[in-house]
Structure formats: structure tokens, C-alpha cells
Image (cartoon, rainbow, N blue to C red):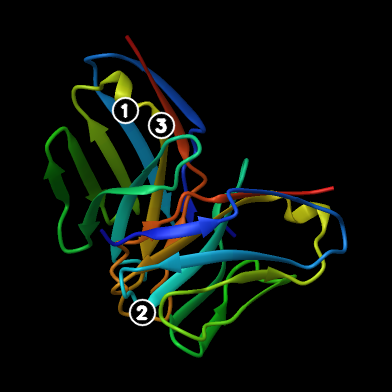
Amino acid sequence: DQQVKQNSPSLSVQEGRISILNCDYTNSMFDYFLWYKKYPAEGPTFLISISSIKDKNEDGRFTVFLNKSAKHLSLHIVPSQPGDSAVYFCAASARGGSQGNLIFGKGTKLSVKP
Amino acid sequence: DAEITQSPRHKITETGRQVTLACHQTWNHNNMFWYRQDLGHGLRLIHYSYGVQDTNKGEVSDGYSVSRSNTEDLPLTLESAASSQTSVYFCASSGSLLGFYTFGSGTRLTVV
């Protein structure tokens, strides 16, 4: 059963607008969440993370929001740029438990149109 | 600069052959991981290692093996390649279990 779910395989937004990528998880033991970005023919690269003790973390144009009661997190990109076009993976881990490894979602392909 | 490299970048092999994919990192990270990426499945963990002589099975380990004889390398072996193992394989390393993985550029493996 999938523990980390990204239900939107793709998202298309206009340059300058906000991109919102969503992620849901089922394992209540997860306490650390990350977003990775992947361009074609390259490996994923770390983008931003959030601990379960926070509900928001911001880094420049990227903000991750965590709603623990809903087991939901989202990545906001404002303003979106064509260079943001990539596949975004949500990942989670339970650092204090046996699942210290990252569990990834299936990814969402973001297309930012000029 | 420290890096993580995978070789080869592309490989075509025949069903039933043994194949080994290389992963080498110069970060001096204790933790190393192998994932495969497939359309509709995202990134799935195959095997991982928390240090020399330590190896563990991940979510999709059947048909794969790894060995860790030093800090820098974690080769992934497909004992008898199957068409279902056609995929893109990513190696990653981290210095802690906090999720800051550094990924290699991937190996695209095709089993015919």
C-alpha cells in the first residue's frame, strides 16, 4: 500500500503564477518530509524539507506547508518560472523509527509555460 | 569536489545475463541506497547500506543483490536479468538518516 501519495501526475501553470503541488501520507510515524526536483536524464536533487514540529518552511520562492492532522503537505512555488519545469517528488521518513529511509511518492510533472 | 557517480549511463543486456551497476561516492557517506524509477511507480527502494559490510533489503529487492566492502562503493547486481528489470536506476548517499540524499545521474538499463 502506498504510504506517500501524489495524486496529480501532472500540473501546468503559467509563468509568474503560483504552482501548488500536493502530497498525502498514511504513516503517522513519518516525522520528516522532503521535496526533490528531477530534470530529465539527471538524478533527483533536494529542494526543501520540513520537520513535523513545524507547519511551514520557506526558502526563497519555495514554501512547504505541513498539515499533520490531515496528513497532507504541499509545495508552493511563487512565482513560477519556466526553469521550474521538472518532476517533483514528495518523500517522507520516520527518523525515530525503523523506517529511516526515504519513501517517495510517484511524482508530479510540473510544466511552467512562458 | 565530492561527487557520486554511476556507471554505465546506459546498458542493454539480454535476459538471463548477470549485470552489475556501479555506484561510487567521494562524500565519505556511510549510507548508500539504490532506487529504481518506473513510470507510474516513482522511486522505489531496492537495497541500502548503513556502512561497510552492512546491507539491507528494500521494497523491491527480489532479483537484486548488493555488497559493501568499502565506504565509497555499493555495486548493484542483477543475478539473472529479466525484462521487468528494465528501468532507470539511481544510487544515492547520505551522511545521516535525515533525508539529505545526494543522487547520482542514473543508469538506464534495458533488458531484451
Q: Residue furthest front?
A: B1
The chain letter under disc 3 is A
Q: Is label 1 on the same chain as label 3?
A: yes
Please state which of residues A105 and B87 is positioned toward the viewer in this rendering: B87
Q: CA distance from mark 2 to mark 1?
A: 31 Å
Residue positioned 46% across, 55% down in the render: A104
The residue labelled by disc 3 is: A86
Q: Kindly report which numbered mark, 3 or 2, lies closer to the viewer in this rendering.
A: 2
Q: Is A111 placed above or below A9 here?
A: above
Up-down: is B20 above or below A61?
A: below
Q: Secondary structure at mark 3?
A: strand
Q: CA distance from mark 3 to mark 2?
A: 29 Å
* Circles 1 and 3: CB atoms closer than 8 Å: yes
* Amino acid on which disc 2 is placed: Asn
Mark 1–mark 3 distance (CA, rounded to whole Å): 6 Å
**Residue drawn where x is 60% and y is 54% of the image:** B8
At 59% from the left and 60% from the top, the residue drawn is: A1
Mark drawn on residue B30:
2
Give residue B68's position: percent from left, percent from top.
52, 83
Which of B107/B86 is in front? Answer: B107
